Amino acid sequence: MALKMVKGSIDRMFDKNLQDLVRGIRNHKEDEAKYISQCIDEIKQELKQDNIAVKANAVCKLTYLQMLGYDISWAAFNIIEVMSASKFTFKRIGYLAASQCFHEGTDVIMLTTNQIRKDLSSPSQYDTGVALTGLSCFVTPDLARDLANDIMTLMSHTKPYIRKKAVLIMYKVFLKYPESLRPAFPRLKEKLEDPDPGVQSAAVNVICELARRNPKNYLSLAPLFFKLMTSSTNNWVLIKIIKLFGALTPLEPRLGKKLIEPLTNLIHRVAHGPAPTGPRVPGRCGLLPGPITWALTQWSVSVLISLSSGMPNHSASIQLCVQKLRILIEDSDQNLKYLGLLAMSKILRTHPKSVQAHKDLVLQCLDDKDESIRLRALDLLYGMVSKKNLMEIVKKLMTHVDKAEGTTYRDELLTKIIDICSQSNYQHITNFEWYISILVELTRLEGTRHGHLIAAQMLDVAIRVKAIRRFAVAQMSALLDSAHLVASSPQRSGICEVLYAAAWICGEFSEHLQEPQQTLEAMLRPKVTTLPGHIQAVYVQNVVKLYAAILQQKEQAADTSAAQEVTQLLVERLPQFVQSADLEVQERASCILQLVKHVQKLQAKDVPVAEEVSALFAGELNPVAPKAQKKVPVPEGLDLDAWINEPLSDSESEDEKPKAMFQDEEQRHTKPRAPEADEQELARRREARRQEQANNPFYIKSSPSPQKRYQDAPGVEHIPVVQIDLSVPLKVPGMPLSDQYVKLEEERRHRQRLEKDKRKKKKRERERRGTRRHSSLHTESDEDIAPAQRVDIVTEEMPENALPSDEDDKDPNDPYRALDIDLDKPLADSEKLPVQKHRNAETSKSPEKEDVPLVEKKSKKPKKKEKKHKEKEREKKKKEVEKGEDLDFWLSTTPPAATPALEELEVNTTVTVLKEGQEEPRGEEQDAEEDREQDLEKKPSKHKKKKHKKDKEERPKDKRKSKKKVPPADEEAAEPVENGTLEEEPLPPMSSYILLAENSYIKMTYDVQGSLQKDSQVTVSVVLENQSDSFLKSMELNVLDSLNARLARPEGSSVHDGVPVPFQLPPGISNEAQFVFTIQSIVMAQKLKGTLSFIAKNDEGSTHEKLDFKLHFTCTSYLVTTPCYSDAFAKLLESGDLSMSSIKVDGISMSFHNLLAKICFHHRFSVVERVDSCASMYSRSIQGHHVCLLVKKGEKSVSVDGKCSDPTLLSNLLEEMKETLATC
Amino acid sequence: AWRAKKIQAILVFNNHGKPRLVRFYQRFPEEIQQQIVRETFHLVLKRDDNICNFLEGGSLIGGSDYKLIYRHYATLYFVFCVDSSESELGILDLIQVFVETLDKCFENVCELDLIFHMDKVHYILQEVVMGGMVLETNMNEIVAQIEAQNRLEKSEGGLSAAPARAVSAVKNINLPEMPRNINIGDLNIKVPNLSQFV
């Protein structure tokens, strides 16, 4: 044994470590692969050893080999072994290897769940950290589901290092396991205000990323983010938030309004100041140096402003933005130039006009040596074109196409030219002849991959712009004529696609051809057979169309010999296609060859055939929108999944098959070889086909739109025939065709302007005479350039009553769809994260698992559940309304003090000037913030509370009730008592508000409330009543914090600062303010000394006054009324985890019913069960302690037995109860 | 395939395209990874040093929604492939933070450090970027965490204990040429325009 160990360590001496491996590889440059395979063999041996250090070393080397491209997944199991080593050194190696090579398909990954869970809860923060890091790379849906709860717990870890990582990894968990989003969201939201900047930034990062995809669900966070934006000094955070607002503003225009001013100021500041100042953390990290900040902020801000569109009055800000961007673009720094262009393109989307003014600059950028910048500029140009400048811009682009080196950029240029011209249904094209010429010029490009794009454009234009067909056909036939140029070299294979379009256009619109015979011959050249198959196929098909047209022409001219010659030509040339290796070509060619031969026979008998041949291609082809088929609505009553005929059983169909085939064959033989159909027969068939089409739901019929009817009219006579003087442009040598159009166009526009001026004069004259006929026809805009031809752009057809939907734009695989979850809804019980069973007890503090008794009960009382559900629905609605109101409220006020970050700039002007008027708005802001904080507690929103009320006693009670709604089934649980038939005795009026302090000016009463969602927070509601004739203002409440209880003060204020009361009090008026306290331990009651200071102002002047008080936090105030069902209650008592204590009070005169009501009301219990004069009651503390009571009434006495998870808390609670009962 | 990662990949390679660090945040088979490294190398190689640090149009990763943001330091290229939601200058700064952190942790970092200590480079990167998302940008914090973990490792005796060291020292004697120390030198070489305002 000892010997073995010695041997092991000697072996180990000669093991290679990572450095040795690297060195070895460097020394074996010639036979690297061989050397590495040797090393892998060694590694395999090492992995077989028991020594974990050896294994770890081997895995470390594997990670290196992985980088070199070697698959190491075979070692997955060994990697897991190393991951589970106890030493951090090895563990880290294991997790690194796992993060490099594990993925969803790794089967052993499921073995890691427990190991990872163990590491996550390790006492060493670095074990936890390493596990989180590793997990972030290979988390699978299963791992996410199993570990979500563990990770969520880590979000509240004591070490910020772990919190930060846990928050960040939650994003991955959400994506893999969307169900975790809702339960985890409240805690994630909390982390937005984490004291550690790293954690905060991680939370902002995650929420912003979530919100970017589903912004509407995060709208209610806007006030919080606004606060963060104005207070954060971390640029990373700032950028993220600004980007988030960019996504939110389109949903809520008022938000843009609120942001626009601070942001405009921000731009001014960053642009004019030398460099932004302000608090900075030492070191450069995270906080970028001045100029970068400058650029970043400016850039982000401009993006935001551009997005907050829909506000007509902010063109000034946009203008400012664009100007600043221009400075960026003109900067010598290429990065800033790039970013400037990027930002510009974002503004362009909403404010094209402001950007168009800088066309010169963008065009200049096209000459930049940097391809990235040229591409950006191209992108911008797309949005900048108008009718006026399209030709000019495209001309400029064409010169770049010629100059461009490198096919990538040239291809990009080409696609951009096409994109620019074809955008929004050729909106900017005034002269389609020019566009066709551009397309033809583009075919001269060498080595482009985008021939099919040009082809598609040619087809589209020729089909949809009827007026251009004659011109297009002429150009295409020229193209076909020079096909040898287009398809000469193999490099140009991409461009030959245009021949596809050319052939089709010439065939389909052959009636416009001037020299059809010539084109036909061009299409039948032997060289054509070298083209790709699909193009040849189109050639063959369109040859026949041409042929039909020529036949028609010749027969009309009674030139039979010429007609026969053409037929002969086809019969001679078509066989070259029949021999094609391409099946499509072969099939078409042989069909057509037979047809032509037949025609030849007829011609020999002097039978006129032209009519019949052209009938093959009768009718017009209409453009159909790409999604048309998908949009055809399924007719009512049609079940596409139902069988039309019941499927035959397998055995039957097998028997049937040969027979069917045989029959089929027979039929084919009996068919007449060639249908010698006469004119009538053909007409009949045509009619039948039309009928069939009319009845066929899948045949897309023409819609009855006026445009369509116009199109459907027979013949082409109605098409506005344009007088095109082809001879002019085509005969000028040495100048690209399109350029001549540019020139012509300029002249034309000039003429047009002159004419318009003339007309205007006339119009004015006419107007003077009182006739205002054509006034609407002519607007003064520059955009109003009449197109050269009367162009009728046929819109793509859609089926009648197509369903308008954007559904098809959404990718069903988008993981963010699953994360489109309403986060404001309260959590349903079924939505809790799965938790490992045995952990329940130890983690009972976390609010997610608290309603255990509820869940258990639910299945047993379906009726109650239903009711509860309804209640929840109501709750939900109410909450939604409140949410909306809160946001509305926040948006409706524009507090001048809400932008502290910007105030620095204005050097306190606002602060000092208006001392008086300052309070109100600030109060409101405070108000809004508080409202937000208390959303969870579902208090009615503040402005409701502000209503002055006379009856103070009643109001608090109302309030209590609304608060009591927090636990959904609360009222129900109390019902048996309140509606009981036994006691009719009316309940005495009760108020939970206790006097806090009082003097001649003011009276303060208060109530303390906790919430199950916040385990260390209580809210103190203080009702302030002005008892004097003075006007009370500048009220400020302050307390002396204890170690255990602290007043939550606004960010940035010290412990000595008070919290302002958000309102003023006129004489005789009362209002309620709320203050949040954080409490560490809740097992003991405690008192805090405090002072309310205020200014009392009356006719004689104003005085500073104060009122001292003692705020008493009873243990009761930490309880939250929580319903509990009897079986869950019984389980709780049986569990034995609770300690017990009891009291007895004598001299009770009150009825048991009222007594219980009093305990319920003042001590926040709910009745679980009541039998005669005995009742069990339940409540729970904000930190999750269960409190169970058994209340028994004897003769004039009451005994209370209590059980609670904390003995101190219980005895304190019972003491407090004793006091209450003593008064009964 | 949908890409949820914001930083898709982090690649470090030298002027000859030899990978020094390959970190993908989305699964690609090893041969595709190598292909991406090669393609990326050719894309950045043909760009001058004085043009912008952003590059669009790598065909293998991501397509149009992604761009390459890179920096060139002496013999090494640091390339981040990120999606459009990340701020370009932010990432540029992040690269700088990463390199400066390397410089601090390796005391004058050079290519050799990356060659022989790929694992350590990964550990440093893990403190900066986690699962494709920016984790920490404060260099002091990053260095502090790295050092704490190194101390922890040292206290455990490390991976390669003394004997292995001794052996490798012996092996060194036979090496024909020990690669020379190539210093990255002035880290700010690439950013004069940005820092002159500071």
Image (spheres, coloured by chain):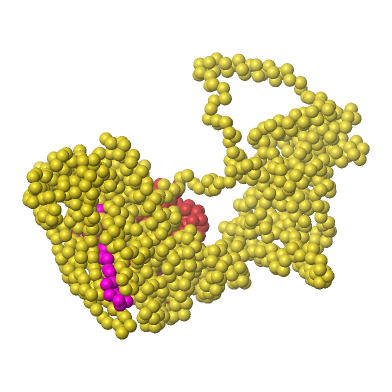
Q: Looking at the image, which is closer to me, A1145 or A592?
A: A1145
Check the image and report above or below for A335 versus B62.
Answer: below
- With A757 as the anchor, is A1092 left or right in this view? left
Q: Which residues are magenta?
A: A1012-1037
Check the image and report above or below for A203 versus A491.
Answer: below
Residue found 58% across the figure and 36% down from its top: A634
Q: Quadrant of residue A534?
A: top right
Residue A958 drawn at (x, y percent):
30, 56
Q: Looking at the image, which is closer to me, A962 or A566?
A: A962
Q: Looking at the image, which is closer to me, A351 or A18?
A: A351
Check the image and report above or below for B148 versus A11.
Answer: below
Residue A1164 drawn at (x, y percent):
21, 52
Residue A35 drawn at (x, y percent):
33, 49
- With A898 as the anchor, is A303 left or right in this view? right
Give the residue furthest to the bottom: A1100
- For chain A, the rendered hue is yellow
Does the magenta segment cover residue A1020?
A: yes
Per the picture, the main secondary structure of the magenta-coloured stretch is strand
Q: Looking at the image, which is closer to me, B187 or A391?
A: A391
Residue found 82% across the figure and 57% down from its top: A724
Residue found 65% across the figure and 34% down from its top: A697
- In the rendered image, the quadrant that contains the C terminus of chain B is bottom left
Give the residue furthest to the right: A558
Does the magenta segment cover residue A25?
A: no
- With A122 as the anchor, is A570 left or right in this view? right
Chain letter for the red part = B
